[in-house]
Image: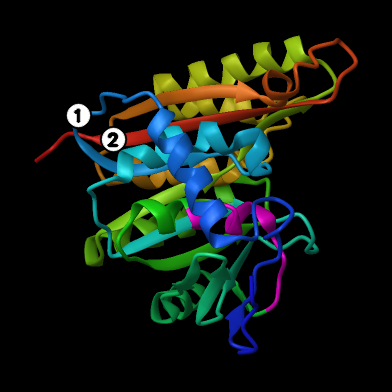
Amino acid sequence: MKRSANPNIRPSAIAGSWYPDDPAELRGLIQKWIDKAAPTETEGKLLGLVSPHAGYVYSGPTAACGYKLLIGKTYDLVVILSPFHRFPPHSCLIQESSAYETPLGLVPVDQEESVRLADRIGARLIHHENEHSLEIQLPFLQTVLPSFRLLPIMIGTGNFDECNPLIEALADLAERKNALFIASSDMHHIEDYHAVVKKDQRVVQALSGFDPKRIREVFNDPECSVCGRVPIWIVAETCRRLGADRFIPLCRTNSGDVTGEKGSGQYTVGYLSAALVAPEV
């Protein structure tokens, strides 16, 4: 992959490591997983997704289960909310570069919406970062959507109440734009395969019930290690305000399912693909 020299383009930070650097190989891999993903019945309007953000060899097939739902759909704007792992604490960071670069080309950032949102909620605009959890969603989107603009948001708070202004702003944004909301999140990170399976099931049950009180209760458990729990909360509550009445799990796996290492002392990370759907009007 030849990197752009344009300083206003955010270059790929993980091509060649977290996913293939070669465009043909990357597109072929994603298409293979999408073709193999089981079709899922999700009658209604698709408003949001939850998608994992591990290296593709681990979570790519799980992510494909969600992205398969986007085939044939169009969106003006894709809003991705991810955690960030390498910045000091800050409630919200928004990328202001003109585009993200991947081996599949450039993903244009909606700079007008980025600035508008940052001004409204007091978020920090940034230009340089190497956060993997947001970028890793982009090649899937580039494969299944004909075109889209991106609003990239990185969340650095664990306080759910701090997110209310952002939820309100995103719901208002969806009145102006045909938007899709994606929460980038891996599930529990524990040195025990069976504990990950059990704890992830508890989270999925809470999310499937779509009860805000229960979801917060599970996410606020001191032993919860779901790294994108706040992005999931923001996307779920934004979609709820837009009419979503269902949280539909599509696929749940973990790293042990890939490696075959399922011992009690084996570090294991869970992965979830899910959809947020509203009734068709």
Query: Residue under circle 1?
Result: 43
x and y percentages locating residue 175 in the rendered image = 23, 61
Which residue is depicted at the point 51% across and 77% down? 99
Q: What residue sits 32% from the left and 65% below the top? A: 147
Instruction: Name the N-terminal-most of marks 2 and 1.
Output: 1
Q: Is residue 222 above or below residue 22?
A: above
In this rendering, is residue 43 above or below 183?
A: above
Q: Residue furthest left?
A: 281
Q: Which type of secondary structure does the marked residue at label 1 adopt?
A: loop
| Residue 217 vertical position relative to residue 18 in the rendered view, above or below | above
Indicate the position of residue 29 as horizontal and vertical percent values. 53, 44
Q: Which mark, residue 277?
A: 2
Which picture quadrant has residue 142? bottom left
Label 1 is placed on what type of residue?
Glu
Instruction: From the top left corner, tell me how far across and down residue 72 is, in percent.
Output: 22, 48
- Do labels 2 and 1 touch, CB within 8 Å? yes
The x, y position of residue 35, in whole percent, is 38, 34
Q: Which tag is nearer the camera, tag 2 or tag 1?
A: 1
Residue at 23%, 67% in the rendered image: 176
Q: Residue at x 58, y 73 (%)?
A: 95
Q: Give me the C-alpha separation between circle 2 and circle 1.
A: 8 Å
Q: Is residue 6 magenta?
A: no
Instruction: Say which quarter of the image contains residue 116.
Output: bottom left
> Which of the numbered marks, if any, corresponds to residue 23?
none
Q: Nearer the viewer, residue 228 or 107?
A: 107
Which stretch did the figure color magenta?
128-139
Q: Residues within 10 Å of mark 1 (few under 14, many from 20)?
A: few
Left or right of 204 in this view: 270:
right
